[in-house]
Image (cartoon, helix red, strand yellow):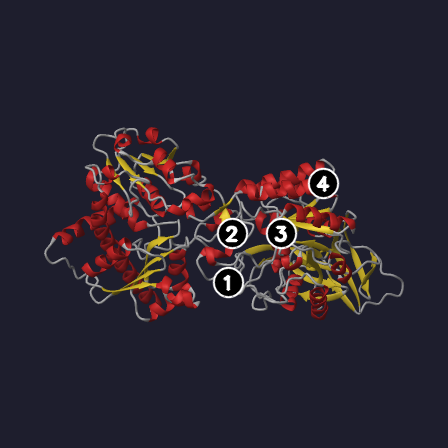
Amino acid sequence: MSISILGARVIDPSSGLDTITDLHLENGRIVALGAAPAGFSPSRTIQADGLVAAPGLVDLDVSLREPGYSRKGNIASETRAAVAGGVTSLCCPPQTRPVLDTSAVAELVLDRAREAGNSKVYPIGALTKGLEGEQLAELVALRDTGCVAFGNGLKEIPNNRTLARALEYAATFDLTVVFHSQDRDLSHGGLAHEGAMASFLGLPGIPESAETVALARNLLLVEQTGVRAHFTQITSARGARLIAQAQELGLPVTADVALYQLILTDEALRDFSSLYHVQPPLRTAADRDGLREAVKSGVIQAISSHHQPHERDAKLAPFGATEPGISSVELLLPLAMTLVEDGLLDLPTLLARLTTGPAQALRLPAGELKVGGAADLVLFDPKASTVAGEQWLSRGENCPFIGHCLPSAVRYTLVDGHVCHEA
Amino acid sequence: MTPFDAKRPLQLNDQGQLRHFLSLDGLPRELLTEILDTADSFLEVGARAVKKVPLLRGKTVCNVFFENSTRTRTTFELAAQRLSADVISLNVSTSSTSKGETLFDTLRNLEAMAADMFVVRHSDSGAAHFIAEHVCPDVAVINGGDGRHAHPTQGMLDMLTIRRHKGSFENLSVAIVGDILHSRVARSDMLALKALGCPDIRVIGPKTLIPVGIEQYGVKVYTDLAEGLKDVDVVIMLRLQRERMAGGLLPSEGEFYRLFGLTTARLAGAKPDAIVMHPGPINRGVEIESAVADGQHSVILNQVTYGIAVRMAVLSMAMSGQNAQRLLDLENAL
């Protein structure tokens, strides 16, 4: 299979390339930028005038719900949704049933993902067995099976000594640890950001300090152990500042934010709409603005969907009884383009936060366009628009953006030179 | 992109009449005044030998209480009976939910029994909103208390009590004392007082029991009882639950009483004709001294009487608003 993509604006944030040119793909690789190699005769030609061609997006947190939660989604459905959002590489978290804490589960996920043939899947392994926070999972065996990083999700390791040892062990083998920084005690029973809105609605609050206290401790332990660390789902402006301070001190830490945290605030909870029930919670407009600035400056180098598909029933209850999460991976590109529309980021910077930024954070072989490299690409029309939900591929029926008209439209997503999505 | 849809307030019909009664948030002053006026007229019904009017004849009112309650449930039952409705009361916490039935299914089943109105109490904030929006929008839903969020009929009966004793709200100072954080009554009272034009609303308690950002209600926060009670016309005491001693919110009932308990001596700092209110059940010697609870300033039992009238007003108004909406929807469908 060989493809020529003609006349696209090719943007590669990893090299700074931004020019109108042609791309030629063969056997799953990019074989030339610009003029086709001698004798190249493509089996397919895509006329891409007016389209942007960029590295396929890299999403660091997409819950695939398999194994164990097939009523919410499965690997085939959610990776299919991902390519519709322009995503060619994604990481899936270990909160499956059974937990992704053994090579057997990791292999199952990787096999199913290969069978599905949509985006590439890089599992994040559980740091502790069963995510119980007591005994280490077999991290090296998991790495050898294909896990790219290790985390404990929102289930904090309750014992600081166990945590320190886990980090030391991971550091021994240069493994990356993904931190969800939310203090268990300070967030206990909480449903929404502790602030005026939660007070008004009578919802138990999760204070900003739930994030900052855990974040400060984690940063100190990272400094002490020298472990490679990525901080995921930062929700507060002060949390972003703590990351910035650590980076200024020379600590090699990276961070990501959920895309919806850059768009929504806790104001969205006003009518108790459970679609906006997420963990960690939506915070204030000041936090959102602080996160946006951190994304702009690069302190937060990755934007992820933090996709959590749910069946309808999971959201059909009073707010506190619903399951948290938003299904949005298939809107990743158009939703993210609102940041360009708002004037926060220029297009190459946005693409950097969606490609090289996340890829470098977890050392994934993705997020760049280079001759000889994998032909993982997204082609999108920046002037068109997407009506969210007009087609819907995710099993997750929990997307608050349905019905909104979003900027840009994904036209083609290619993984290893195969067109996985076309619209 | 705007992430929020503008929609008609859930609890009003197209003509701005009440069709559910979920919260006092967003209800205009005229509507609150109408509730109070209607309740005033029902107070006379309660004083008659035959205490019934036929406004809800042939209608079925279903009290669905997922949380224990005696006073609220009984007054709702009486209110519905005095309006000539058929009344069923269910204590659901002990029946279906323990068998795993969801709130959604429980309510759908009751709806299928042709209930015209639900009075719902639930421990989750937002439960009444959920039912009105997603479960049975065509049945009038009355919030009998949802989590910490709202207890709007209690809020309105408190307002009726204040109006009947003080005449109006324009020149009043009102203090709400105690566990504001966990109190749906406090939240509904604050909204109602604000909407009715009360210029000086004070909340008094330790910082552990004052919700973050409470200033949004237009209230002033006091942490000193004497200072907060100075020259107030109305004191609303809140119940302090025993379990608040766990988790570091308070050291002990004794210390709370020492600092925030309402005694005769402390009440002397308020206006000489101040009234003392309490949503009940009261904890004598925890938040209020017996001498105050039973004293001349206390209107606590009047509140109970007014509660029936207010609930009659809300039930009749919501039923009529819901009926009007059904007719409108029918006409629009034709």
Comes first in the chain, label 3 or label 1 = 1
Please tell me the numbered disc located at residue A223: 4
| Residues flagged by tags 4 and 1 on a common chain | yes
Q: Quadrant of residue B94?
A: bottom left
Q: Which image quarter: residue B250?
A: top left
Label 3: how many Cα within 10 Å (few below 14, some 14–19, many 20+): many
Tell me the subunit letter for badge 4.
A
Residues behind callouts 4 and 2 on a single chain: no
According to the image, label 1 marks what residue?
A314
Q: Position of residue A218 (x, y in %)?
A: 66, 43
Dot 2, how many residues are within 10 Å of its Cα: few (below 14), some (14-19), or many (20+)? some
Q: Is residue B278 above or below residue A137?
A: above
Label 4 SS: helix
Q: Please give the chain letter of the residue carrying mark 2.
A: B
Mark 3 vs mark 1: in front: 1
Mark 3 vs mark 2: tell me if same chain. no
Q: Which mark is residue A336?
A: 3
